[in-house]
Amino acid sequence: MTALQAKRLDTVGMLVSLLTLGLAIAWAFPICWSLFATATPAPGASLLSVLENYRQVIFETSLGRWYINSIVTSGGVTLIVLAISSACGYAISQINFTGRTVLWFMILASFMIPVQALIVNHFFLIYQLGLLNTWLGVILPQLIAPISVIVYKGFFDNVPDEYREAAQIDGARHWQIFLGIYLPMNWGITVALGIIVFIGAWNAFLWPFLAVTKPELMNVTVGATESWSGEVSELITAVMVALPVAVLYLLFQRKVTDAISFSTGIKG
Amino acid sequence: MARKGQPIDNRSALPLVAPFVLVYGAMFIYPTVLMVAMSLTNSSLTVAGEWVGWDNYAKLLTDKRFGVAISNTLLFVLLTVVPGTLVGLGLAMLVNRLSGVWRSVALATFFLPYILPVSSVTTMVYLLTYPGAPLGNIYQRGGQAVSLWYNISTFIPAVAILTIWWTVGFTVLIFLAGLRTLPRELYDAARIDGANRLTTFTAITWPLIWPVTALVVTLQTIMQFKVFDQVFLLALSGRVDPTMVLVQYVYTVAFQRNQAGYGSAVAVGLYVVVMVLSVLQWQATRLRSAR
């Protein structure tokens, strides 16, 4: 490579790096602008007024109440989804039972269920059960998670059969092997799936919006859209609604991206 | 598929499989059957109605608003899927050049919006594009800045751009995984042959990444067909009818007009489209992994 070529390459590389930087700034702009707008005191006001604005939104609105609803329903969805899909994934992976193939193909076929199409009938059903305006009513329709079963089965398939066989010779039952060996061996995927299921449930809008009409029972994503309280308060609310999932993502970036890759089948 | 040489053991399997199957049956299979059954009745949201046969479907064929909802949804799918995929590939290639900390920072920047809740995202962008705000003067009429969300012709394109910004991180992630699998030797060979960047892209990257592109396009199409949240939240301020999308029409018919039977018929249409796309997608991935 001649010096001239190397120099040209360098210039192009620099330009591409600059382009990347520019796009990154553009991508971050709406979020940074919102954060900045909430942190700028009104003209003439002191810096303390910023804290006062945040304090008002956090303590003098229903935000705290909505947070509790979101934490309970998203936490409930996460725990139940992980429990039922890991058990089902283990059974399909390790046990021979009647209807196993049929069940597996039904799960595969429902890979991308259009839950949005079922809202009318979910509402009808939850109404008949008397569960509108309850935490359980918000949780139930969010529990269909075929993808988690698919991911778990994939991971359990990769555990060498000798582990199960050795435990069986020692007299262990399948549920003991599942809880004692297979689940602990794949702790990482449980954490990763748990994080993205929680983020998904926290961000869910349509069903929590339909299932709850009482303001005190709303999830934070729904409650935040219910009233207009002025630009700064709105932005502070938007920041507070996003905060838990943003922090969760920034702390567990690798887990989140891994879990999403596993769920789309491009990895694992 | 069957585990060879292993006896059938229903007693061990039952307690492990039953909870999932119960939930799956009660919250997916049963509502699906209910959807089809209700679409043949004049049910309300809370009371089962009378059998009306194919009436709802006949009505659907002549329903102007349903037609508008379909064309808006198709426009939205077109405006998000194709540009979103290209932007995703472009950003993935830019991120892929980087390494170490810069790679993580760049990926996180493009990915962060994807994990934010829709209500936060719409509030932020709505206020950012409000006349007087930094991006408030994009659309003007008669020398006066008009909010993109108050104007029918800019509404769907603006929601599409918002959606690309919001969800492209997902696409970038898939493309990055795909780019990692491309053989290095081909690029080395191309460089030795003196190929420029454009040739390298059209002759190596694009054809080799094509299966991933196909996956992204199908996943995106399925995802964007089901659009509701951002369209609904941003349209709250104005007229809803001209910018209505399919899921929103299901909502309007069933929840605002209390015609759950007719709403179910609209939902059946949506359901069939999405399921067909899912099956196609699944077949495509199977073909890809079989190769």
Image (cartoon, coloured by chain):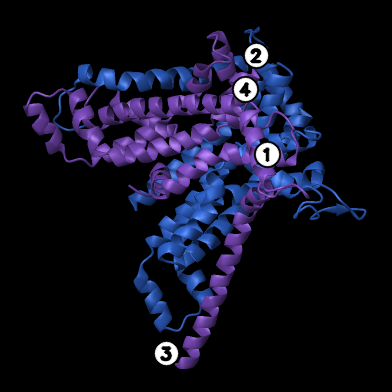
Chain colours: A purple, B blue
Q: Work out whether B149 lies above or below A11.
A: above
Task: Look at the numbered discs 1 and 3 and tell me whether their residues touch, using CB distance below 8 Å.
Answer: no
Q: Earlier in the sequence, mark 1 or mark 3?
A: 3
Judge if badges 2 and 3 mark residues of a common chain.
no
Tell me, for residue A53, which label it has, or none: 1
Numbered disc in front, either 3 or 4: 4
The residue at 42%/80% (across/down) is B191
User: Which of B166/B194 is in front?
Assistant: B166
Numbered disc in front, either 1 or 2: 1
User: Which of A135/B258 is in front?
Assistant: A135
Drawn side of residue B206 relative to residue A177, left or right:
right
> Type of residue at label 2?
Leu
User: Could you tell me which secondary element the residue under label 2 belongs to?
Assistant: loop
Query: Would you identify the image quadrant in which residue A167 lies?
Result: top left
User: Which of B98/B92 is in front?
Assistant: B98
Marks 2/4: CA–CA distance: 12 Å
Query: Would you identify the image quadrant in which residue A176 lies?
Result: top left
The extreme left residue here reads A169
The residue singled out by tag 4 in the image is: A210
The residue at 56%/31% (across/down) is B272
Residue B118 horizontal/vertical position (percent): 61, 39
Judge if badges 4 and 1 mark residues of a common chain.
yes
Label 4: few (<14), some (14–19) or many (≥20) C-alpha neighbours in 10 Å = some
The residue singled out by tag 3 in the image is: A1
Label 3: few (<14), some (14–19) or many (≥20) C-alpha neighbours in 10 Å = few
The residue singled out by tag 2 in the image is: B45
Marks 1/3: CA–CA distance: 60 Å
Task: Look at the numbered discs 2 and 3 and tell me whether their residues touch, using CB distance below 8 Å.
Answer: no
